[in-house]
Amino acid sequence: MKKLLVILSFLLFARPAQAAFTYRVVYTIDNAQVPSTQTNFPVPIALNNANFKTVANGGHVQNSSGFDIVPFTDAGLTTQITGCELEAYSGTAGTGVLWVNVASLSSSAPTLIHVGYGNSAISTNQCTTTSTWDANYKAVHHFPNGATLSVTDSTSNGANGTTAGSPTATSGQLDGAIHLVSASSQYEWFQFINPAAMTIEAWVRATSFPDTYNAVISRSETGAANFQLLVKSNGKLAAYLLASGSVNYDGTGTNTLSTGTWYHLAMAYDSSGGLRVYVNGSLDNSAAANGTINTTAQLTSVGYDWYAAARYWNGDIDEVRISDVARSANYILTDKNSLTFGTLGSELLVGGMKPGTLVTLGAGR
């Protein structure tokens, strides 16, 4: 008897009946990069693949704004993650960043995010941007795009920025960043209700350290600085904070920053844990607590110190975030790791197969 050989070719544009999305990819997060399980954690997924171009540009995304790029918890794309934000999507280049609020980011097993796309029925944004950021975030500035500077806040607090001295957009750690020239007195500022505890975070890259103190982020009040995160001319950090009294350290940390290199900086404080400052997720130095933060401050600036003149930043700053809680050391390290702790898999048809896969079935005699 002859053996029957049946070859099934899955066509590139075959669409399974159970879902309106044609394609999906799996983003796998390495749990070894998550020191402890985190809840409601904002995960960035870098989109940089020809498949994420729009159909008109040779890709598989249907909506010109990328609205049909949507995260799910499952491979069948039935449980959508609505807490998401698509940052600076380009349909011509197939690039952007998809932020996803992960309910539980595991330290014991890989976390999977399934990203569906290729749904021509979608014409509006499927993400709730403000839900990407937990209630403790008071300001999140991405400075997206890299070509046109935006100082819009991504939280629900409306802490949108205003620029001084005409800073420009540049490439950042994720999409764009703000480029500041100290000689031109360039900075950004915004307002929000001052917290009694806080964490400030930013990625920074200095062109030079021209001043005795070079400001990353500061917050002012009448006659005093509420908090300051500064880099000295020798690359050492200086951190100052006004609580019941001054809490600070100045140039005594373990790290020395170099020019031309990106660093993740974080400064956290509350009345129990005191002041802690981190460089790339590792503790630089700390200072004992001295009550709660003075809450009368008014303005927060990026790249300028309200307290003292001639303390501008010379270089680039990206992903500025301020929280009203002292984030844990593990949270800060996870945040630093999040830029590179995941892998975006190959394109799959919804249902599991790669486009163009040939499946051979052998029948019996």
Image (cartoon, helix red, strand yellow):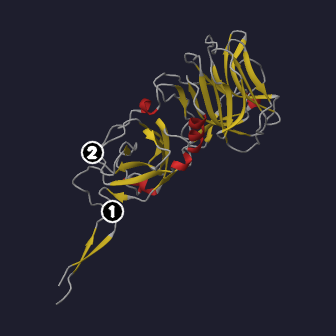
Q: Position of residue 139 (x, y in %)?
A: 54, 26
Residue at mark 2: 121
Instruction: Assess whether mark 1 and mark 2 are in contact (beta carbons under 8 angstroms).
Output: no
Taking the image as shown, residue 50 lies to the left or right of residue 357, namely right
Distance between mark 2 and mark 1 Cα atoms = 22 Å
Q: Is residue 319 above or below residue 248?
A: below
Q: Quadrant of the N terminus?
A: bottom left
Q: Residue at x 61, y 14 (%)?
A: 298
Can see residue 287? Answer: yes
Identified by mark 2, the residue type is Ala
Q: Residue at x 59, y 20 (%)?
A: 197
Q: Position of residue 263 (x, y in %)?
A: 68, 41
Q: Is residue 289 above or below residue 87?
A: above
**Depth order, front residue of 104/102:** 104
Identified by mark 1, the residue type is Met
Residue 316 figure quarter: top right
Q: Quadrant of the C terminus?
A: bottom left
Residue occupying the far bottom of the picture: 1
Labels 2 and 1: the sequence-earlier one: 2
Residue 181 figure quarter: top right
- Closer to viewer: mark 2 or mark 1: 1
Can see residue 146? Answer: no
Residue at mark 1: 353
Q: Residue at x 56, y 39 (%)?
A: 335
Query: Few, some or many C-alpha atoms within 10 Å of disc 2 (few <14, some 14-19, many ≥20)?
Result: few
Q: Position of residue 75 (x, y in %)?
A: 33, 52
- Which element is circle 2 on? loop
